[in-house]
Image (cartoon, rainbow, N blue to C red):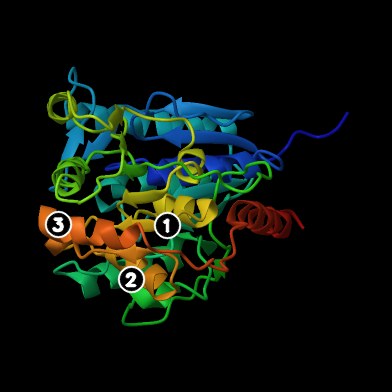
Amino acid sequence: MPSERPRLLFYCQHSLGIGHLTRSFALATSLAERFRVVFLNGGRLPPGLPVPRDIEIIDLPPLGMDDGHTLISRDAKQGVAQAMAQRRTLIEAAVHEHRPAVVLVELFPFGRKKFAAEILALMRLSRRQAGGPARVVCSLRDILVDARPDQQRHDDRARGLTDRYFDAVLVHADPALARLEDSFKPSRPMRTPVHYTGYVVPARAAQAAPVRGAHLLVSAGGGIVGDALFRCALQARALLPEPPPLRIIAGPFLPEAQWFALQAAVQGQPGVELLRQVPDMVAEMRQARASLSQCGYNTALDIIVAQVPALVVPYATVTENEQSERATRLAELGALQQLDPAQLDPQHLAAAMQALLQFTPRPAALALDGADCSARLIAQLHAERTA
């Protein structure tokens, strides 16, 4: 009989949107061809998001952060402290039961500082488990936030934890567009090997050329911080001499009060369609005349794959600059147009929308095989452990 596939514990804590979860599910799908994947899910699973087959999911009590980075419980029946205690118990039980050959941790220690206690417990247990220590790997997006008030201290701490606990860092990017050192600058070089995998996109069958409709597609990823963009798009459209039809995808995490208010705002407006969510955003973009969105990791890649004329208004705060960096780099390639989030008002957006309708993007020659490449690299690390 064939031997059982080695076990891999995949820790994913998605907090503000669904980008981390979508990327992690794409990775898990490729990993499941080589490993028995046990997925530690730390946030809410949005309704309608396809869950990869052939993986086991352990749902931890869902925690997240609001847009002020305050840790919150997604379950009204329990507080943060109670949820954290239950999560720690479930994580430790998963290590004892599965004795993983590999532990894959999404973002930490380059982020997820508020979850450090449970992640460190996961790694320490897996290092000293019966049967030998697990390989520990970090799964990292292309561009990190690098505008914290204590950024140097943060980077130095991340470098120290990476060198102590991790065997490799996988950066899910094409180094021609983004390199880790662009947004991560510790005082001393990191010793842990860094591998660039290419960008991670969900697998999809080959498709015919897009069939463009007349409408402008408006979206904001999971939607939790999309309300200002949606409202401004409605106001800007009214200023255009020939307003295009709008198809607004609100997202599963748009707060309920904002969803109801948005429904009221579009009621009776001809040419405006409002949906809560769709199963395939790339398919939506391929059918649209143009796209208006933010610029998270998955949204940016959806734009590249769909080759849709796109205008992005990055989500940005005093400390959140990741989307702005990504938007600037892609705009320099001619892959999309961008509007400074400081100019998100009806007049500026109307002018940008008018320019968008005349825009033809240039194809971005980026490596998009990050899921398969990551699975191969992790399999090689495991093979080195067992050799």
Q: Which residue extends farthest bottom?
A: 188
81 and 108: which one is in front? 108
Residue 249 in percent (x, y) is at: 32, 35
72 and 143: which one is in front? 143
Judge left or right: residue 219 versus residue 166: left
Circle nearer the N terminus (1, 3): 1
Image quadrant containing the N terminus: top right
Label disc, if present, on residue 344 of the rendered structure: 3
Report how far apart the C-alphas of labels 1 and 3 lie in the structure: 19 Å
Q: Nearer the viewer, mark 1 or mark 3?
A: 1
Residue 113 in percent (x, y) is at: 27, 53
Q: Nearer the viewer, mark 2 or mark 3?
A: 3
239 and 134: which one is in front? 239
Residue under label 1, please give it.
309
Mark 1 Cα shell of 10 Å, populated few (<14), some (14-19), many (≥20): many
Confirm or deny contact between disc 2 and disc 3 (CB under 8 A).
Answer: no
Q: Amino acid at mark 2?
A: Thr
Name the secondary structure under disc 1. Answer: loop
Q: Amino acid at mark 3?
A: Leu
Report how far apart the C-alphas of labels 2 and 3 lie in the structure: 16 Å
Residue at 28%, 34% (x, y): give it.
Answer: 250
Confirm or deny contact between disc 1 and disc 3 (CB under 8 A).
Answer: no
Residue 220 in percent (x, y) is at: 30, 44
Q: Amino acid at mark 1?
A: Pro
Residue under label 2, please give it.
328
